Image (cartoon, rainbow, N blue to C red):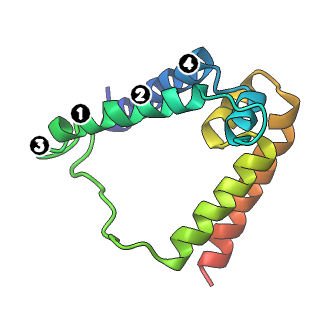
Amino acid sequence: MSTHARITLAALLSGALFGLGLAVSGMTDPQRILGFLDVSGDFDPALLFVLGGAVLTALVLFRFVLRRPAPVLAARFQIPALKQIDRPLLLGAALFGIGWGLAGYCPGPALVGLGVLSPEALWFVPAMLLGMYLHRWLGGR
Protein backbone atom coordinates (compact mmCIF):
# COMPACT_ATOMS: atom_id res chain seq x y z
CA MET A 1 0.00 0.00 0.00
CA SER A 2 1.41 3.43 -0.93
CA THR A 3 2.17 6.08 1.68
CA HIS A 4 -0.61 8.29 0.31
CA ALA A 5 -3.11 5.43 0.60
CA ARG A 6 -2.01 4.71 4.21
CA ILE A 7 -2.39 8.38 5.15
CA THR A 8 -5.82 8.54 3.50
CA LEU A 9 -6.95 5.35 5.26
CA ALA A 10 -5.66 6.62 8.62
CA ALA A 11 -7.51 9.92 8.11
CA LEU A 12 -10.70 8.08 7.18
CA LEU A 13 -10.49 5.78 10.21
CA SER A 14 -9.63 8.68 12.54
CA GLY A 15 -12.57 10.70 11.23
CA ALA A 16 -14.92 7.74 11.59
CA LEU A 17 -13.75 7.13 15.16
CA PHE A 18 -14.19 10.84 15.96
CA GLY A 19 -17.69 10.83 14.45
CA LEU A 20 -18.61 7.69 16.36
CA GLY A 21 -17.39 9.26 19.60
CA LEU A 22 -19.44 12.39 18.92
CA ALA A 23 -22.53 10.30 18.19
CA VAL A 24 -22.13 8.04 21.24
CA SER A 25 -21.61 11.04 23.55
CA GLY A 26 -24.65 12.85 22.12
CA MET A 27 -22.55 15.78 20.90
CA THR A 28 -24.14 15.72 17.44
CA ASP A 29 -27.36 17.10 18.93
CA PRO A 30 -27.34 20.92 18.61
CA GLN A 31 -29.85 21.19 21.46
CA ARG A 32 -27.38 19.51 23.82
CA ILE A 33 -24.67 22.00 22.82
CA LEU A 34 -27.02 24.94 23.21
CA GLY A 35 -28.04 23.53 26.60
CA PHE A 36 -24.38 23.54 27.65
CA LEU A 37 -23.98 27.15 26.53
CA ASP A 38 -27.17 28.24 28.35
CA VAL A 39 -25.58 28.74 31.77
CA SER A 40 -28.43 30.87 33.10
CA GLY A 41 -31.26 28.64 31.86
CA ASP A 42 -31.64 24.91 31.32
CA PHE A 43 -27.92 24.09 31.67
CA ASP A 44 -26.78 20.66 30.40
CA PRO A 45 -23.29 19.78 31.79
CA ALA A 46 -22.79 16.70 29.55
CA LEU A 47 -20.39 18.50 27.21
CA LEU A 48 -18.20 19.41 30.19
CA PHE A 49 -17.59 15.70 30.84
CA VAL A 50 -16.90 14.99 27.16
CA LEU A 51 -14.43 17.90 26.99
CA GLY A 52 -12.85 16.87 30.28
CA GLY A 53 -12.32 13.32 29.01
CA ALA A 54 -10.73 14.63 25.81
CA VAL A 55 -8.41 17.02 27.66
CA LEU A 56 -7.36 14.34 30.14
CA THR A 57 -6.67 11.85 27.34
CA ALA A 58 -4.63 14.41 25.39
CA LEU A 59 -2.74 15.49 28.50
CA VAL A 60 -1.63 11.93 29.21
CA LEU A 61 -1.02 10.65 25.67
CA PHE A 62 0.66 13.70 24.11
CA ARG A 63 3.61 13.22 26.47
CA PHE A 64 4.25 9.82 24.92
CA VAL A 65 3.46 10.79 21.33
CA LEU A 66 5.76 13.82 21.29
CA ARG A 67 8.69 11.71 22.54
CA ARG A 68 8.73 9.97 19.17
CA PRO A 69 11.10 11.43 16.56
CA ALA A 70 8.23 11.72 14.06
CA PRO A 71 4.60 10.67 13.58
CA VAL A 72 3.98 7.21 12.19
CA LEU A 73 2.78 8.48 8.80
CA ALA A 74 4.71 11.74 8.41
CA ALA A 75 8.30 12.93 8.29
CA ARG A 76 7.90 15.38 11.19
CA PHE A 77 5.44 16.79 13.69
CA GLN A 78 3.71 19.99 12.57
CA ILE A 79 3.49 22.03 15.76
CA PRO A 80 2.50 25.70 15.45
CA ALA A 81 5.42 28.09 15.81
CA LEU A 82 3.24 30.96 17.09
CA LYS A 83 3.24 30.89 20.89
CA GLN A 84 1.45 34.15 21.78
CA ILE A 85 -2.19 35.10 21.67
CA ASP A 86 -2.76 37.62 18.88
CA ARG A 87 -5.66 39.51 17.33
CA PRO A 88 -6.44 36.98 14.54
CA LEU A 89 -6.57 34.18 17.12
CA LEU A 90 -8.98 36.12 19.34
CA LEU A 91 -11.17 37.14 16.40
CA GLY A 92 -11.23 33.59 15.06
CA ALA A 93 -12.11 32.18 18.48
CA ALA A 94 -14.88 34.75 18.88
CA LEU A 95 -16.35 33.96 15.45
CA PHE A 96 -16.14 30.23 16.18
CA GLY A 97 -17.91 30.70 19.52
CA ILE A 98 -20.62 32.92 18.05
CA GLY A 99 -21.29 30.42 15.25
CA TRP A 100 -21.27 27.55 17.72
CA GLY A 101 -23.70 29.36 20.01
CA LEU A 102 -26.06 30.36 17.20
CA ALA A 103 -26.16 27.02 15.40
CA GLY A 104 -25.22 24.51 18.08
CA TYR A 105 -22.69 23.08 15.65
CA CYS A 106 -18.95 23.18 15.18
CA PRO A 107 -17.22 21.50 12.19
CA GLY A 108 -16.94 17.91 13.46
CA PRO A 109 -20.52 17.46 14.66
CA ALA A 110 -21.78 19.41 11.63
CA LEU A 111 -20.23 16.86 9.27
CA VAL A 112 -21.76 14.03 11.30
CA GLY A 113 -25.09 15.89 11.17
CA LEU A 114 -24.73 16.26 7.42
CA GLY A 115 -24.24 12.50 7.17
CA VAL A 116 -27.62 11.92 8.84
CA LEU A 117 -29.25 14.77 6.85
CA SER A 118 -29.89 16.99 9.86
CA PRO A 119 -31.79 20.09 8.65
CA GLU A 120 -29.50 22.39 10.64
CA ALA A 121 -26.39 20.78 9.16
CA LEU A 122 -27.78 21.14 5.65
CA TRP A 123 -27.53 24.94 5.96
CA PHE A 124 -24.63 25.10 8.42
CA VAL A 125 -22.08 23.07 6.42
CA PRO A 126 -22.40 25.15 3.21
CA ALA A 127 -22.13 28.34 5.30
CA MET A 128 -19.05 26.91 7.06
CA LEU A 129 -17.44 26.01 3.73
CA LEU A 130 -18.18 29.48 2.38
CA GLY A 131 -16.54 30.98 5.48
CA MET A 132 -13.46 28.80 4.96
CA TYR A 133 -13.28 29.87 1.32
CA LEU A 134 -13.63 33.55 2.24
CA HIS A 135 -10.91 33.21 4.87
CA ARG A 136 -8.54 31.65 2.37
CA TRP A 137 -9.43 34.25 -0.27
CA LEU A 138 -9.09 37.23 2.09
CA GLY A 139 -5.99 35.76 3.73
CA GLY A 140 -4.22 35.68 0.38
CA ARG A 141 -4.72 39.43 -0.11
Circle 2 Cα neighbour tier, 10 Å, few/some/many (<14 / 14–19 / ≥20): few
Q: Secondary structure at mark 3?
A: loop
Distance from label 3 to label 2 (Cα)?
22 Å
Residue wearing tag 2: 53
Front: mark 1 or 3? 1
Among the 4 quarters of the image, the one containing residue 112:
top right
Question: In the orientation shown, which residue stands out farthest toward the front?
Answer: 40
Distance from label 1 to label 4 (Cα)?
22 Å
Residue wearing tag 4: 20
Along the line of sight, the residue nearer the viewer: 133 or 31: 31
Q: Position of residue 20 (x, y in %)?
A: 55, 18
Query: Residue at the location (67% across, 28% down)?
Result: 44
Q: Secondary structure at mark 1?
A: helix
- Disc number placed over residue 73 in the picture, else none: none
Front: mark 2 or 4? 2
Mark 2 or mark 3, which is nearer the start of the sequence?
A: 2
Mark 3 or mark 4, which is nearer the start of the sequence?
A: 4
Q: Position of residue 59 (x, y in %)?
A: 28, 38
